[in-house]
Image (cartoon, helix red, strand yellow):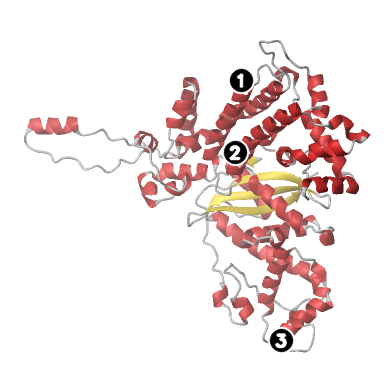
Amino acid sequence: MAIVAMSPGFDNLLRQAENVMGLLPYAGRGQGDAVLQPADWEGGMALQALPVFRLRIIPGKRRRLNDQPGDSVDPDRLEAIYVRFIAACSLPFRLVECPEFRALLVYLNTDVDTWLPDTHETVKKWITRQFDTEKEKVKQRIQSATSRVHISCDLWTSPNTLAILGVVAHYVTEDGQLQHHTLALKDIDSHIINLAAKAFLFVTDNEKLEHDDSGNNATLKEIKAWRQKGSLGKLHNFVVFIQRSVQRSQRFQVLSRNRKLARDNDTRWSSWYTMLRAALNLREAIDGYFSKWTEADCAGDELSAEDWIVLGKVKSFLEKLKMTTKALESSFATLDNVLLAMDFMLAQFEAGKEAHKGDPMMGPMYNSGWAKLDKYYRLTDESPAYVAAIVLHPSHKWHYIQENWKTEWVESSKKLLQTLWNEYRPVEPAIPFCETPSMTTNEFLNWRNKHLQPSLIRDEYERYCKSERVYGFTSALSWWLEETQRKNYPNLSKMAVDILSIPAMSAEPERLFSGAKITITDRRNRLGRDVIEALECLKSWLGLQDIASE
């Protein structure tokens, strides 16, 4: 779920964000703190070899663990580096209590043992302290953002059964970079493409089972039965049957040359695509299993030639949705891609409906998926941000909408966008610079010059729409961040940066949860929500990559 704030209500959203991480008031933008780079450090080669990153050193009182002077180790730097090490590598806090680990560090530098904590509780305190320190820096970055701050969030159940809400901020920094920062993981007591794909796979509404001209229609009861024992149902049952037994898995791997089947799940439509792709690649092995072993539990799940044709069609369609999702999941995919992607998907569903009018099974699947997607497509009318994102793309402007939408949709969209622009436009539009011809004593020449002079377009938005479309840039956001656009369209460029910094999907919270899943290992499954939040926020703010995920 992406929360898009494009009205005065945005201030309320920011006040909620203050509760998340103690943000300072949005209006008070300040300057970011100076940071210490590794090149500024004194000390060992190990520190100099680290990649450049922002590191806040907080001098503080430290407890010595022995009588050694420990002068060759800066305890404050040691704390910051050790916390990064634990966060990036998802290591247990009790590692400091391991004699072999300490022996390794002491071998490298005996003074380490003077300052490295001897209990996991101290490591937790170190993490909390670094989290609080970095949080202050993130506050400053958000306050000095060039754009509005957009919030996306999602729900997740962690491996250690915590119900968590992930919150991510998206904004453009002072130096014109699109930034994504984790703000919080909070206790709690999907996506449009995901819903449309599930509706396609599993028809759930009787009114969407439209009658075709041949009268060859299916009831919801029959569709459910087909789901359970039809092509998809048969494949699902077979995969579960194979994976439930080590012996059957070994038999199948002999036929498949050690390639494994993939299994679907209830939460991700893409898991069905993965299962179908694997099964179609292993068709020979699957057919071979039924030929070689006949077992009562899966006797009714043997796939016929017709079943394989259906599975191939479903896989091909899901592949289109997969490609669309992939394009929108990028960290650089912004709101200008959303309506275009939905137009593309609706066109695919409509083509499928037309091609499968007489199909009692595939027809309702396309109808159901189309209806679900159309429902959310219509909801985009409630926010001007989606249309604005297309129009503010200098390669599109109004051309795409006028060419692909109905006339009444275009007119209503123009009114919606004009209302949004009125929130940004100045009361008195600035007069664009234009060299005027000098006055003469010849009345005819003055009259001619007056009537030949082009009319000045004072409104920035109108001037932008009437100008030629532009091509050859990396992204619409980067184009608007250029000095030329900021100078020519001072107010419209602000609106454009606000709109085009909105993410296309809530993919960042999903990436956050993927990292958190690595953090909560079997050896760390008792971590509390506050510690998980601190670790994941530090990884986000410091730009750390999960070593386990590489």
Q: Determine the secondary structure under disc 2.
A: helix
Alpha-carbon distance for marks 2 and 1? 21 Å
Query: 275 above or below 543?
Result: above
Of residues 418 and 470, the one drawn nearer to the viewer in this rendering: 470
| Residue linked to disc 1 | 354
> Earlier along the polypeptide chain: callout 2 or callout 1?
2
Alpha-carbon distance for marks 1 and 3? 77 Å
Image-quadrant location for residue 38: bottom right
Q: Determine the secondary structure under disc 1.
A: helix
Q: Determine the secondary structure under disc 3.
A: loop
Task: Look at the image and tell me in which quarter the C terminus lies.
Answer: bottom right
Q: Residue at x 67, y 13 (%)?
A: 212
Using the rendered image of the protein, determine whether residue 264 is visible from the camera's viewpoint: no
Single out the residue that lies furthest toward the left.
442
Using the rendered image of the protein, determine whether residue 409 is visible from the camera's viewpoint: yes
Q: Give the number of the mark in front: 2 or 1.
A: 1
Single out the residue that lies furthest toward the front.
292
Task: Look at the image and tell me in which quarter the N terminus lies.
Answer: top right
Q: Amino acid at mark 1?
A: Glu
| Residue linked to disc 2 | 324
> Earlier along the polypeptide chain: callout 2 or callout 3?
3
Q: Amino acid at mark 2?
A: Thr
> Earlier along the polypeptide chain: callout 1 or callout 3?
3
**Pointer 2 with pointer 3, Cβ within 8 A:** no
| Residue linked to disc 3 | 70
Q: Residue at x 38, y 41 (%)?
A: 470
Q: Amino acid at mark 3?
A: Gly
Q: Residue 294's mark?
A: none
Image-quadrant location for residue 49: bottom right
Tally the numbered discs. Answer: 3
Q: Give the number of the mark in front: 1 or 3.
A: 1
Query: 383 above or below 129?
Result: above
